[in-house]
């Protein structure tokens, strides 16, 4: 829920609780403005109305006064119903009304601009038809942080050559005959990029977490996981069989307390000492836009002899002066993080995930991971895309493309965030994170903002419950290095218009100002 | 109670009071003191605590003393996973290893679509239109029109209402099962299913009842037991869903499931069938449509058919087809679909072209592969000393040595020897925590474009290897 920007100093056991300042980023704080009372009130009222109408419509449907839309089960009698009727209450009555805002099909490269395929519905979102038109819009929805989603250029040429010489797939698992020279080359480049001893790559980011956490921890181990961790981390933790404790988001004091209590009291009931303690955090949290407090985590890790698992899905390539993720951003040592995990879907515009660390760790994963034993290895053209991007990013020359894109993204982030905040929007997250959530609160605004922006030629992602807390629906802008200043200005102007239409610009910390009066 | 009893009680009480009046003071005070002491002991004394609270100093000592295990145990450097062969070039009908070309009987390339020119061309076109990655999950601008086309084509191929694609073969069935089956539900699962299904079953947290591999009698026994439990508590039984999870052609065994009987039992015991056709898609049936075609069973009776695009189709990813009612649920509840980026467009384009080839060809490819599988089966049976597991029409066979000779060491020797003669085969690799670890075996996979000579050569090499290993 919303927090105030200053909390009382709680008793701490060490120097934890203040974000460790780093020379080039003095006193940068994440500000989470409190929810205005009026917004909370109207949002709850909104949900109550939706529920009332939902019950009423369900009544009509059950009494057959209204036609039951959507597909029905065609199984003969005697079978237990496949879905619980309550589970689908939310889907039928709330989600279905705004479902045209999600799953929008596109027909082009998901670059700085994209073509959204126009859909119309004549039965209130139960079914869609394509009109055949394409709406070219500025793309603030895709995870294309460094702008490498391209269908031309020398990287695309490399990929096309690989399709000709390497095939599309290997149809074999990594432990059998699926390892190609390209995979080994990718892994060694990745290890060089991250400054670790070795790395291993998999074909899917979600599966990298879900299939590898079980090889690291098992019964008798403790996992300390952040409140807002991604589903893949939660699934991996559950499959491993370890005990899971959740600490409040980015709250290092709570984490330290949990660590101390865990080591002192041991496993539940038997009180045996824990075999291992693993702290799982993400670099950048995709719904809040916040950064993990890495220096403090490393301090805690060293003090209590725990292990640290860092999921850099959204931060690899996007954070840090050399694009090497949050470890680079906070200027920490790569060797201090035990397990570095990341994905290739976001900044590298490919698909897949990796784990990097020291040689023993990677060897262990090679032998015991579910991914290497049973899943087919990565597709060669996708590997080529990642390798080409890595070559560009390894090049430290400031004139060259890799560094240029990293700087462009950093500039875009600061520019967009500052102007958006000064215009009066309530924005969450760290000032340097390329994920920018602006609060909308109510479900009807979620739908309205999305549709209005698309009419004006901007494609955005709006999310509500259950991905976010009930009252805190938001729009999440994902910035990219392929956005120019002109594109961002256009987006800001449209956001100003729509923000006024929906009465969104209610920040008390930054009272609302028109676009042309905000400077950077 | 009679009047006389009441009277005697009253007199006793009167006598007691009189005695109090006449007792000496010290006696009375002593008695009162005893009564008070006993009541204090019984009611007011606090029980001694079982554990004393730890002091800060003791806690700090515990924290300082605690030593965790190393994050990972040490690994044997001779483990086969650390010494894999690294290949170069296209892994098709032949592979390049150490500069030599050898025949490939090890990868799941049943229809030899890996490296096909037509498919490569379509993939190149897709890169030129869409780039490589889709940069988002299906819900947030990651749905590309080519995904919708592939889903529609798959549904049409299987003559079902709707299809859904996933970006990774392993995650497909592992995400599908937990989307439908929750904590209170019951899963009847064949013991021989592959690892991804086992993980899906684990993630669902449902009650699992394993039945012996392909043993219908064992399944019927479990179903009958469950029916008895249901009769005892009919109200609870009405809220428990039941599912049967089986594979069309088992990857770990090579044999086909007895689907007809299972469909009959479905209507008797009221469970739903999830059929995983990873291996049987594109290899079994006259037009490659799997075991439902082979047995001529109406596909509407199977609730969900899931498969992979990584074996016969030669691309990456997985899919599921079924009625709209069943499949649509996954779009919001399957974790591997909602929370993961979508399939790169070039891989979807490759899959569509592969489907085109399968549909144009209609029957030739599939008749050929079934025919060659039968021939290979006969040939290997004629080599004394090998046990072949798997149906004769199955293109995937497990080769084992007889009885006590069947160890991983000997099988690896056979594989190494075969490699020196330019035949690539592989020992099937499993993790140690499989539900029922199969016996060590060589997994032999037939490529449809192998000709008779090459099959003969394979058998010759196998025979020589056997001689070398058993002497």
Image: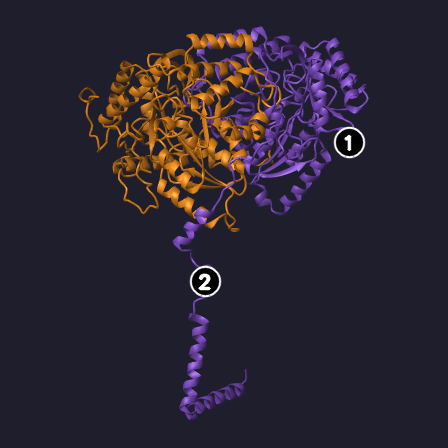
Chain colours: A orange, B purple
B314 relative position to A445: left or right = right
**Based on the displayed image, in which of its 4 quarters is residue A448 positioned?**
top left
**Based on the displayed image, in which of its 4 quarters is residue A47 positioned?**
top left
Mark 1 or mark 2, earlier in chain: 2
Give the chain letter at badge 2. Answer: B
Q: Nearer the viewer, residue B155 or B23?
A: B23
Q: How many marks?
A: 2
Q: Residues within 10 Å of mark 2 (few under 14, many from 20)?
A: few
Q: Which residue is mark 1?
A: B404
Label 1 SS: helix
Q: Position of residue B387 (x, y in %)?
A: 77, 25
Task: Please determine if labels 1 and 2 lie on a single subunit.
Answer: yes
**Based on the displayed image, in which of its 4 quarters is residue A74 positioned?**
top right
Q: Which mark is residue B49?
A: 2
Q: Position of residue A413 (x, y in %)?
A: 30, 22
Label 2 SS: loop
The span from disc 1 to disc 2 (Cα, nearest Å) is 61 Å
Name the residue rendered at 51%, 21% in the picture.
B167
Q: Is residue B151 visible?
A: no
Q: Nearer the viewer, mark 1 or mark 2?
A: 1
Q: Please say if B52 is above or below B173.
A: below
Quadrant, the C terminus of chain A: top left
Q: Position of residue B165 (x, y in %)?
A: 52, 21
Quadrant, the N terminus of chain A: top left
Q: Residues within 10 Å of mark 1 (few under 14, many from 20)?
A: few
Q: Nearer the viewer, residue A493 or B463?
A: B463
Q: Position of residue A209 (x, y in %)?
A: 49, 30
């Amino acid at each position: 829920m919303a927090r105030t920007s200053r909390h009382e100093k709680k008793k701490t056991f060490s120097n934890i609780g203040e974000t460790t300042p780093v020379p080039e980023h003095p006193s940068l704080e994440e500000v989470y403005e409190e929810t205005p009372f009026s917004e909370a009130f109207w949002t709850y009222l909104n949900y109550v109305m939706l529920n009332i109408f939902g019950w009423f419509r369900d009544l009509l449907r059950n009494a057959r006064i209204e036609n039951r839309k959507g597909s029905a089960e065609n199984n003969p009698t005697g079978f237990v119903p496949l879905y619980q009727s309550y589970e689908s209450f939310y889907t039928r009555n709330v989600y279905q009304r705004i479902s045209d805002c999600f799953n929008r099909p596109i027909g082009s490269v998901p670059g700085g601009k994209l073509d959204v395929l126009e859909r119309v519905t004549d039965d209130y979102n139960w079914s869609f038809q394509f009109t055949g038109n394409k709406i070219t819009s500025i793309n603030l929805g895709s995870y294309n942080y460094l702008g490498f989603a391209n269908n031309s250029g020398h990287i695309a040429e490399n990929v096309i050559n690989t399709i000709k010489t390497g095939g599309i797939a290997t149809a074999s698992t990594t432990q059998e005959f699926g390892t190609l020279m390209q995979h080994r080359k990718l892994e060694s480049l990745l290890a060089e990029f991250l400054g670790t001893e070795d790395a291993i790559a998999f074909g899917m980011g979600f599966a990298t977490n879900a299939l590898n956490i079980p090889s690291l921890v098992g019964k008798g181990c403790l996992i300390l996981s952040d409140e807002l961790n991604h589903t893949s981390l939660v699934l991996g933790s559950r499959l491993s069989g370890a005990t899971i404790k959740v600490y409040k988001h980015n709250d290092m004091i709570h984490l330290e307390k949990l660590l101390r209590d865990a080591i002192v009291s041991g496993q539940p009931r038997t009180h045996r000492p824990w075999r291992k303690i693993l702290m799982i955090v993400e670099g950048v949290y995709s719904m809040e836009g916040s950064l993990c407090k890495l220096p403090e985590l490393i301090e805690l890790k060293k003090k209590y002899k725990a292990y640290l698992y860092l999921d850099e899905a959204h931060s690899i390539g996007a954070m840090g002066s050399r694009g090497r993720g949050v470890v680079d951003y906070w200027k920490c040592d790569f060797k201090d993080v035990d397990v570095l995990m990341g994905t290739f879907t976001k900044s590298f515009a490919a698909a897949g995930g990796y784990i990097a660390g020291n040689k023993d760790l990677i060897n262990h994963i090679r032998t015991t991971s579910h991914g290497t034993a049973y899943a087919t290895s990565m597709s060669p053209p996708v590997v080529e895309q990642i390798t080409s991007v890595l070559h560009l990013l390894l090049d430290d020359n400031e004139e060259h493309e890799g560094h240029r894109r990293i700087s462009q993204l950093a500039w875009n982030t600061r520019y967009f965030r500052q102007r958006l905040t000064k215009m009066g929007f309530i924005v969450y997250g760290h000032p340097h994170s390329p994920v920018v959530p602006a609060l909308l609160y109510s479900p009807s605004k979620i739908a309205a903002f999305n549709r209005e922006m698309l009419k004006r030629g901007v494609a955005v992602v709006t999310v509500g419950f259950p991905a976010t807390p009930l009252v805190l629906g938001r729009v999440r802008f994902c910035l990219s290095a392929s956005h120019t200043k002109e594109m961002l200005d256009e987006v800001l102007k449209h956001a100003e218009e729509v923000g006024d239409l929906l009465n969104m610009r209610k920040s008390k910390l930054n009272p609302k100002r028109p676009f042309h009066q905000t400077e950077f | 109670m009679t009047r006389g009893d009441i009277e005697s009680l009253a007199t006793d009480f009167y006598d007691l009071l009189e005695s109090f009046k006449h007792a000496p003071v010290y006696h009375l005070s002593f008695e009162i003191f005893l009564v008070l002491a006993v009541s204090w002991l019984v009611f007011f004394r606090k029980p001694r605590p079982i554990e004393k609270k730890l002091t800060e100093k003791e806690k700090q000592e515990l924290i300082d003393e605690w030593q965790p295990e190393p994050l990972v145990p040490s690994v044997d450097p001779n483990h086969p996973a650390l010494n894999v062969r690294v290949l170069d070039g296209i892994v098709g009908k032949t592979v390049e290893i150490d500069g030599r070309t050898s025949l490939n009987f090890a990868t799941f390339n049943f229809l030899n679509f890996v490296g096909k020119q037509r498919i490569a061309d379509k993939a190149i076109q897709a890169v030129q239109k869409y780039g490589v990655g889709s940069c988002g999950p299906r819900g947030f601008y990651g749905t590309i029109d080519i995904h919708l086309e592939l889903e529609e084509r798959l549904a049409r191929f299987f003559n079902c209402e709707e299809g859904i694609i996933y970006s990774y073969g392993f995650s497909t069935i592992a995400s599908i099962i937990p989307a439908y089956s929750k904590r209170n539900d019951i899963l009847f699962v064949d013991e021989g299913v592959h690892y991804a299904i086992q993980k899906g079953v684990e993630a669902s947290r449902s009650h699992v009842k394993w039945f012996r591999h392909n043993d219908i009698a064992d399944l019927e026994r479990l179903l009958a037991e469950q029916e008895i439990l249901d009769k005892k508590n009919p109200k609870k039984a009405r809220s428990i869903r039941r599912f049967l999870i089986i594979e069309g052609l088992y990857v770990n065994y090579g044999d086909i499931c007895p689907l007809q009987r299972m469909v009959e039992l479905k209507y008797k015991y009221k469970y739903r069938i999830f059929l995983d056709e990873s291996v049987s898609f594109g290899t079994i049936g006259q037009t490659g449509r799997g075991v439902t075609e082979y047995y001529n069973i109406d596909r509407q009776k199977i609730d969900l058919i899931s498969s992979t695009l990584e074996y016969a189709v030669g691309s990456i990813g997985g899919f599921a087809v079924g009625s709209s009612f069943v499949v649509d649920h996954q779009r919001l509840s399957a974790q591997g679909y909602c929370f993961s980026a979508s399939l790169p467009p070039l891989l979807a384009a490759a899959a569509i072209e592969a489907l085109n080839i399968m549909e144009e060809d209609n029957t030739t490819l599939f008749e050929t592969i079934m025919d060659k599988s039968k021939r290979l089966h006969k040939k290997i049976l004629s080599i004394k000393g090998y046990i072949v597991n798997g149906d004769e029409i199955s293109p995937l066979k497990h080769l084992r040595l007889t009885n006590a000779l069947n160890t991983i060491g000997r099988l690896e020797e056979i594989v190494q020897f075969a490699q020196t003669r330019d035949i690539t085969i592989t020992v099937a690799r499993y993790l140690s925590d499989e539900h029922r670890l199969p016996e060590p075996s060589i997994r032999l996979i037939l490529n449809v474009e192998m000709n008779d000579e090459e099959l003969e050569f394979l058998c010759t090499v196998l025979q020589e290897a056997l001689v070398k290993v058993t002497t």
